[in-house]
Image (cartoon, rainbow, N blue to C red):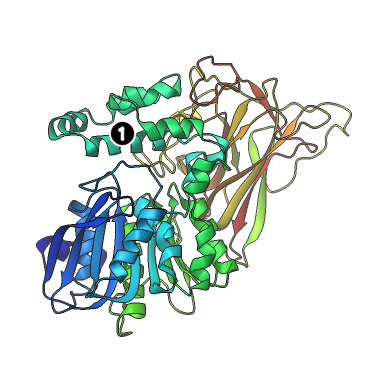
Amino acid sequence: MSLATAVLRRVMRLPAPRVPRVSVDRDVAVPMPDGVVLRHDHHRPAGVERGPVVVVRSPYGRAGWIGTVFGRLVAERGFQVVVQSVRGTAGSGGVLSPFDEAEDGAAFVEWVLDQPWCDGRLATLGPSYLGLTQWALAPAAGKALRVMGTLVTASSFRDQTYAGGSFSLDNALSWSSMMRTMAAGPVARTVRLLRGRRTITAALDTLPLSSADRRATGGEVDWFQEWLRESDPDSAYWTHRAYTGGVEDVARAGVEVTMLGGFQDIFLPWQLADHAALRAAGARPRLVLGPWVHTAGPGMAAGMREALAAFERVLGDGATTVTAATSDDAPVAVTLSGGGGTRRLADWPPPDAAARTWYLRADHSLSVQPPPDHTGGAVRWPGTRVDYDPADPTPALGGPILTGRSGPRDQADLEARPDVAVFTSDPLTEDVVALGPVSATVHVRAETEHLDVFVRVCDVDPRGRSVNITDGLVRLAPGSPAPAADGTRAVDLELWPTGHRFAAGHRLRLQLSGGAHPRFARNPGTGDALGEATTLVHQPREVLHDAAHPTAVTLAVEPRR
């Protein structure tokens, strides 16, 4: 047992290790079918000569926290672990082509299963990209794959890249810069780390976007350029990198799957789509959700406890020493934000949750009562002006972002801006627990056909402090959605699902704006190609909230307990 894993065991609330020592065979070379050599570290528990193997494939190296958490810590539970660097990273040959992991994953699985120290049973483990590599290799592993520990991830990263039809600029450029920094020599890496996020922050404002990677990293990043060009979900590029079709294969093979998701995580909507696909195919995955941002410590600890408990249950002797968050009679565990405690559920979304809608009113209030028809339909009822200037774009403040100031944040500065419209309910007379999907319909009238609509739900405490809970954006194009006879467009949005307690005495607040830069790339208003736009068009719009145009947000609400 190492000092690092001893500390991690205490932080993660894990029991004592099952084995006293772990040895590591480092830089083991495995040739791929095209001759490129990939390298891995083999963590061997003392006394285990042959047994199941946990496969971890990572673009972030094999040392540091990757090797400690997903290698040694797991090996101390008595499982062999192989941590492989994906192509083009950390000693593995070839060139990194992000998310293209099926062929190498299949070849590595075949190699592992052919080793005398593997008994034919496999598990997989890891968060984020390390989770995508699990879905990529799963079809090739077939019935040899017994259990998957997936954390804050999804079977395809395409929809996260273009969330709402926009482009997740901050995530894409920050990740590209990080990968370039990791691949740089020691001097260049040190310089970039000392500069911190300043260079990226400046690059996020660059136009055209096709030059942002050079501004952030000092050179062109081939995959960033591909993402700017390949936004079509049916393109060959993304079809080749999507593993959603393998989700049903996993269910049919009887693989036990554990899933850790965060309500402020960048992958949550698509991870829950994978969960729904598994359930539809007859599987019973274990799902743990909580108020976590991407790879946050408490979330990672909860996900590791769940995964290790499943490994012991499926691959061990059945005696589970790791305490998991779920139980056999409640495969879903949800930790609510807002001090709402924990819920153990039979499924997600909770089948007994009821939809409750709050409507926008002309006086900037929110009400569960639909707006009255004061005009009888004869007179146009005025709406609320929401400006958007892409030359001074409405900023992002908190929310599901990969790096920087993510998660719940005080919204005072944002709500003080003239390009953000705010609608607030009366103080709640009782607790309201939002638990499940969140949606909104916004009726807009605008001369510009190219624009974005951003909606955010906040919790306002009795002191007036507003904190973001969930949000979503959708990008509009000519004819999508089609205008009504009066020229208005009804815009439907799916916000991030949530689990939050709005306490009695608190108020709900809805923000409306034309963007959240640089989390989402600003909409230039021209319809120009994503990477080429330099002309910026002012985009005023009117949000309607009369009886004929009931703009509203709908939460799935837990029944009174």
Q: Quadrant of residue 171?
A: top left
Q: Quadrant of residue 328?
A: bottom left
- Amino acid residing under circle 1: Ser
Q: Residue 45 or 120: which is nearer the viewer?
A: 120
Q: Position of residue 80 (x, y in %)?
A: 23, 70
Looking at the rendered image, the quarter that the C terminus falls into is: bottom right
Q: Position of residue 55 (x, y in %)?
A: 30, 64
Q: Residue 266 or 248: which is nearer the viewer?
A: 248
Q: Position of residue 557 (x, y in %)?
A: 60, 58
Q: Quadrant of residue 73?
A: bottom left
Q: Height in image: 534 above or below 85?
A: above
Visible residue check, residue 404: no
Residue at figure coordinates x 66%, y 54% from the top left: 356
* Numbered marks: total: 1
Residue at figure coordinates x 33%, y 22% from the top left: 215
Q: Is residue 313 left or right of residue 240?
A: left
Q: Which residue is mark 1?
A: 177
Q: Height in image: 201 above or below 145?
A: above
Callout 1 secondary element:
helix
Q: Residues within 10 Å of mark 1 (few under 14, many from 20)?
A: many
Q: Residue 35 or 280: which is nearer the viewer?
A: 35
Q: Residue furthest top?
A: 535
Visible residue check, residue 42: yes
Q: Residue 350 or 232: which is nearer the viewer?
A: 232
Q: Position of residue 558 (x, y in %)?
A: 58, 62
